[in-house]
Image (tube, helix red, strand yellow):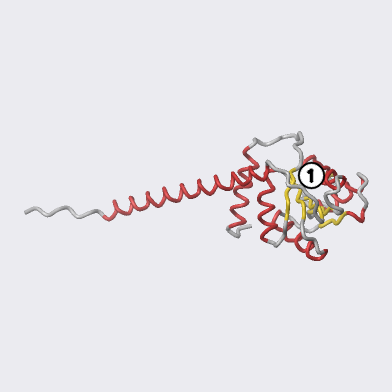
Amino acid sequence: MSQMPKPRPRRWLLKGFSVLLFVLVVGVLGWCRWVYVQIERYAGQDQATPADAIAVFGAAEYAGRPSPVYRARLDHAEALYNRGIAPLIITLGGDGGDEYSEGGVGREYLMGEGIPESAIIAETHSHNTAESARRVAVIARANGFRSLVVVSDATHLFRIHEICAANGLNVLTSPRPRVPVENNPPAMDPIIHEILSYTAWRLHLE
């Protein structure tokens, strides 16, 4: 009698690897979809209600002047302040390689717009979103703030909210208005950046 051929281990290994790869791809796509939905949800709503302070997350500055994007964030914070949303504005962001800091530039810009210096706190040492969230948490605890309205780009707000919450902050989000800027990236670029950045933060890689 002829013997039945034995199963080839290599074939089973390849099948197992294919199944594992399929599960991994489905998991990654599912995760990206979930993060995308959260980003869009926060981007599409303005939660601004009366709070203890308004926190403006920094963006680029050019030789002491806010970039168009940063100026739009600051203008939005000023509008919220003038509406009586909060009596204080916190500007966030360290230096960008020159003698100026984003937080300091934001303070000077707001003062030039008529906001009194006593109504502004400038944080001038953070260099990314996670650092800004940690430092604004320290400021909030030191001043007894119970709630903050956070201002940034629409697609940035979900990540900011999650990092601030992880630092014990009760935050509401308020997206800045859109502004025309040169070399505007395709619409999906900021979202892809946020998905990757949020994932890196959750994996403790940032």
* The N terminus: image quadrant: bottom left
Q: Which of the two residues, 100 or 85, is positioned nearer the viewer here?
A: 85
Tell me: 166 left or right of 89. left
Please state the horizontal and vertical placement of residue 143, each as a whole percent of the image. Answer: 83, 63
Residue 151 at least partly seen: yes
Please state the horizontal and vertical placement of residue 104, each as a whole percent of the image. Answer: 85, 53
Q: Which of the two residues, 89 or 15, is positioned nearer the viewer here?
A: 89
Task: Look at mark 1 in the image and give the residue it sits on.
Answer: 73
Q: Total of numbered circles in the picture?
A: 1
As shown in the figure, which amino acid type bears the numbered disc 1? Arg
Q: Which of the two residues, 135 or 4, is positioned nearer the viewer here?
A: 135
* The C terminus: image quadrant: bottom right
Tell me: 52 left or right of 171. right
Element at label 1: helix
Please state the horizontal and vertical placement of residue 86, each as a whole percent of the image. Answer: 84, 52
Residue in view at x 92 percent, y 56 percent: 118
Tell me: 125 left or right of 113. left
Residue furthest to the bottom: 142
Residue in view at x 41 percent, y 48 percent: 22
Q: Which of the two residues, 6 or 163, is positioned nearer the viewer here?
A: 163
